[in-house]
Image (cartoon, rainbow, N blue to C red):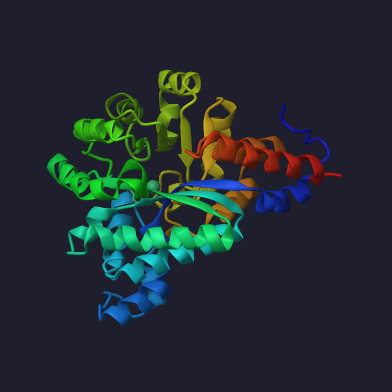
Amino acid sequence: MPPDFSGIPAERLAALIVRAPKAELHVHIEGTLEPELAFEIGRRNGIVLPYDSPESLRQAFAFTDLQSFLDVYYAAAAVLRTEDDFHDLTWAYLQRAHADNVVRAEIFFDPQTHTARGVPFETVVGGMSRAIGRAREELGISAALIMCFLRHLTEREAFETLERAEPFREHLLGVGLDSGERGNPPEKFARVFDRCRRLGLHAVAHAGEEGPPASITAALDALGAERVDHGVRCLEDQSVVARMVRERIPLTVCPLSNVKLRVFDTLAHHTLPKLLAAGLRASVHSDDPAYFGGYVNENLRQSFACLPLMAADAYTLLRNSLESSFQPAAEQARNIERLDELFENWGR
Ligand code: ADE
Ligand code: ZN
């Protein structure tokens, strides 16, 4: 039974959303690299970024589409070299997530961005895993890693990456697919994902961000995706919507990202209310928060400020985030209980 929201005054909803336990299911660790940290890490590694200062890097954050963003994002990631760099990046993110009351974070990383520069796979995973262990101890936050394949690269390169990853299998929760969607359909990676699923890895994929609804269908059928990242373009095909509702496929929606990358003109044009009205299992996340203007609470705050969303929608989005995570059922249930208690008591 969902809690009774009737006692929650609209003006107190924003504070409730901030306080609520939530899961972050769509965040790229490289996209949490704040310009100040990029410069600090660059300095200690003797790597000069093609920008004068953190401010001038920030000024380059005027994107026209996904690719214009990816060009800056891959350039900034070049400062990351040592295990400490990956630890510091992940630790900084997990502290921010904790401040937003994220209780579970399933974090994407792009190993190929780093191994292509000669950084060993174990350096990347070692640093991130150390930060995740520290965050569990010191902050009580649960986090895990999802390894993404870059879809603009080849199937062979994806297989090579998987081979490098196999000795670190216990550090990985699942695999994902990201980078430029246009011209790189999910089918290209069907055999790679097949092998990943046989290794017991969860499968997710970016689809329906810039690509058409058929790309979502392909992510489900060719890759066995258990969650669709973005997926907002599903609304262009009612048969895809019907299937996602029927199969309860989670959609990890990133409103500020969609505006920055021009999927929607403004936040007021975002279709999040329509996704919820259609009965889709949507939740709100941050994608690349250092580049798009905010972490998960800021995505929620601005969405509720600009869109016709109510307390019941807040509950649905937060609950969907917790339920769509790959956490064991008992931990999920505990988090949902905490969410219910907070909503029950907030208006009283
Ligand atoms: N990598 C980082 N952010 C991404 C996004 N929004 N879409 C595809 N690939 C990405
Ligand atoms: Zn993403």
Q: How many marks?
A: 0
Closer-to-camera residue (201/28): 201
Q: Quadrant of the C terminus?
A: top right
- Is 223 above or below relative to 292? above
| Residue 207 falls in image quadrant | top left
Q: Residue at x 41, y 73 (%)?
A: 37
Residue 76, image x, y percentages: 31, 67
Closer-to-camera residue (273/327): 327
| Residue 90 falls in image quadrant | bottom left
- Residue 308 in sight from this viewpoint: no
- Is 277 above or below relative to 310? above
- Residue 66 in sight from this viewpoint: yes
Residue 232, image x, y percentages: 44, 35
Residue 94, image x, y percentages: 50, 60
Q: Residue furthest right?
A: 348
- Is 41 above or below relative to 275? below
Side of 132 where 338 appears, left or right? right
Q: Residue furthest left?
A: 156
Q: Residue at x 61, y 41 (%)?
A: 318
Q: Quadrant of the N terminus?
A: top right
Closer-to-camera residue (23/67): 23
Residue 82, image x, y percentages: 29, 70
Side of 105 where 111 appears, left or right? left
| Residue 345 falls in image quadrant | top right
Q: Residue at x 20, y 59 (%)?
A: 115
